[in-house]
Image: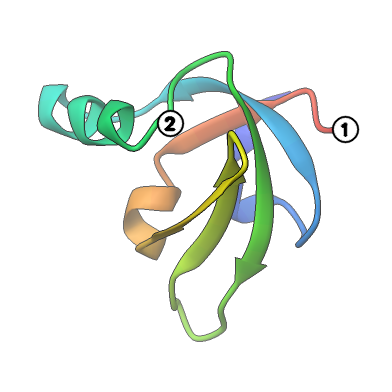
Amino acid sequence: MTQPITSLETGKTAVIVRLDGGHLFRKKMGEMGIREDKTIRVVAIHPFHGPVVVEIDGREITLGRHMAEHIIVGDTA
């Protein structure tokens, strides 16, 4: 089952299966190290549609909620 990263609970880990967006979105994500088949962990999801903090390759990255909703994951651990 696939779902946006924003659907996961804090502390959960999953594998990125797809980046739903155009070329510039995928390029921006790639520059931050967010790519398909990478493992990503939710550090925090701030309330009131605030940012989402994720960890990938040992680095924490803060993303706007709208951007995070386009990161599709599967295989939660």
Name the quadrant containing residue 37.
Answer: top right
- In the drawing, what numbered circle is on residue 62? none
Q: Is residue 21 above or below residue 49?
A: above
Q: Farthest residue to the bottom: give it.
A: 48
Q: Is residue 8 left or right of residue 68?
A: right
Residue at left offset 11%, top offset 30%:
24
Say which label, 2 or 1, has the lower sequence index: 2
Q: Farthest residue to the top: give it.
A: 37
Residue at left offset 31%, top offset 26%:
30
Q: Amino acid at mark 2?
A: Ile
Residue at left offset 33%, top offset 51%:
67
Judge by depth and name the residue closer to the eye, 57 or 9. Answer: 57
* Rendered location of residue 44, percent (x, y): 64, 68
Q: Is residue 3 above or below residue 11?
A: above
Judge by depth and name the residue closer to the eye, 37 or 31. Answer: 31
- Residue at mark 2: 34
Name the quadrant containing residue 35.
Answer: top left
* Rendered location of residue 18, percent (x, y): 47, 20
What sort of colour scheme is used for the picture? rainbow
* Rendered location of residue 10, percent (x, y): 76, 62
Q: Amino acid at mark 1?
A: Ala
Q: Is residue 15 above or below residue 37?
A: below
Judge by depth and name the residue closer to the eye, 5 or 27. Answer: 27
- In the drawing, what numbered circle is on residue 77? 1
Q: Is residue 8 left or right of residue 66?
A: right
Tell how many labels.
2
Q: Is residue 2 left or right of residue 67?
A: right
Determine whether label 2 and label 1 are within 8 Å by CB.
no
The quadrant of the rendering that contains the N terminus is top right
Q: Farthest residue to the front: give it.
A: 58
Separation of residues labelled 2 and 1 (CA atoms)? 18 Å
